[in-house]
Image (cartoon, coloured by chain):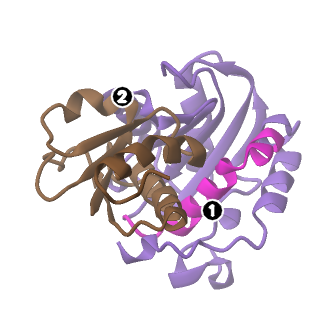
Chain colours: A purple, B brown
């Protein structure tokens, strides 16, 4: 990653992480495990996590419970830095047909997000930007309906362009 | 006022919850220290007034003396505001109106 692609404190921005390499639209999967495999493979192929990170994400999801389905239709998967994260990374896969993840209120899921953190700091700018994006129902709807990878990347780019981290500073953690 | 946001590992959800809570409390004009924490190292007690956590962590929070706010939706500001307001009022950090 080039220096100019980094945000405050050298933290990468969401836009530099959610790219053609790590975003896929309208994929077909039949189980939550396949959905996790799909988004995990994007991160592996981008060279940002090791292969075993995918299994670690699935194991964390099984261990920790379904709360990773953070809102109706949206899951945010991740494991620990020591599970094979090479550099801070985010991926997104939207599903043609939603699949259940076992959450009592927020199933089924059609926006599958994954990230890898190297510590509790470097992914924070991107995480904040992602949270801002997901807070906006109109933005989520545009993500949901993007028909191919290129359109999905464009949508993310248009939604998040110029967005700065909020004043509430997670940086100080 | 000390508020803990809780998640499984302390890398994702608890950080996002902290961010939303900071915005909500600022709007409500409530001062609080917000600390993201992971379930593994959180022992439930100490100097914590309010714990904000995903709903399916309820079973881990039976022992705590702090007030517990459980959320189904972790990114909906209105939902979070609605849930935390009564607790802030109960704690005297916010008036009824």
Asked if disc 2 and disc 1 are in contact, CB closer than 8 Å, the reply is no
Q: Is residue A47 left or right of residue A60?
A: right
B97 versus A128 height, above or below: above
Frontmost residue, A118 versus B42: B42
Q: Residue at x 85, y 35 (%)?
A: A145
Estimate the x, y position of residue A52 in percent, counting from the top left. 41, 41
Q: Quadrant of the N terminus of chain B?
A: bottom left
Task: For mark 1, name the chain.
Answer: A
Q: Residue at x 71, y 70 (%)?
A: A163
User: Residue B56: which disc?
Assistant: 2
Magenta segment boundaries in residue numbering: A120-142
Badge nearest the viewer, 2 or 1: 2
Secondary structure category for the residue under label 1: helix
User: Residue A1: which disc?
Assistant: none
What residue does disc 1 label? A129
Instruction: Tell me if residue A141 is in the magenta stretch.
Output: yes
Q: Is residue B94 left or right of residue A69?
A: left
Q: Is residue A74 left or right of residue A81?
A: right
Secondary structure category for the residue under label 2: helix
């Amino acid at each position: 990653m080039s220096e100019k692609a980094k945000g405050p404190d050298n933290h990468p921005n969401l836009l530099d992480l959610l790219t053609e390499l790590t975003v896929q639209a309208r994929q077909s999967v039949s189980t939550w495990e396949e959905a996790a495999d799909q988004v995990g493979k994007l991160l592996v192929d981008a060279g940002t996590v090791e292969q075993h990170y995918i299994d670690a994400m699935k194991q964390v999801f099984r261990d920790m419970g379904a709360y990773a389905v953070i809102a109706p239709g949206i899951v945010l998967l991740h494991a620990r830095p020591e599970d094979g994260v090479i550099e801070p990374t985010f991926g997104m896969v939207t599903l043609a047909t939603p699949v259940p993840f076992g959450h009592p209120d927020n199933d089924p899921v059609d926006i599958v997000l994954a990230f890898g953190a190297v510590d509790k700091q470097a992914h924070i700018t991107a995480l904040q930007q992602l949270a801002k994006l997901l807070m906006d129902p109109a933005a989520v709807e545009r993500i949901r309906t993007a028909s191919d990878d290129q359109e999905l990347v464009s949508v993310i780019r248009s939604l998040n362009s110029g967005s700065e981290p909020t004043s509430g500073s997670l940086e100080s953690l | 006022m000390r508020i803990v946001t809780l998640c499984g590992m302390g890398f994702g959800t608890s950080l996002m919850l902290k961010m939303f809570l900071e915005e909500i409390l600022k709007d409500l004009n409530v001062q609080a220290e917000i600390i993201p924490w992971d379930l593994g190292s959180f022992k439930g007690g100490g100097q914590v007034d309010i714990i904000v956590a995903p709903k399916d962590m309820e079973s881990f929070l039976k022992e705590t003396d702090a007030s517990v706010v459980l959320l189904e939706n972790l990114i909906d500001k209105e939902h979070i505001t609605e849930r935390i307001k009564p607790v802030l009022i109960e704690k005297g950090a916010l008036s009824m109106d």
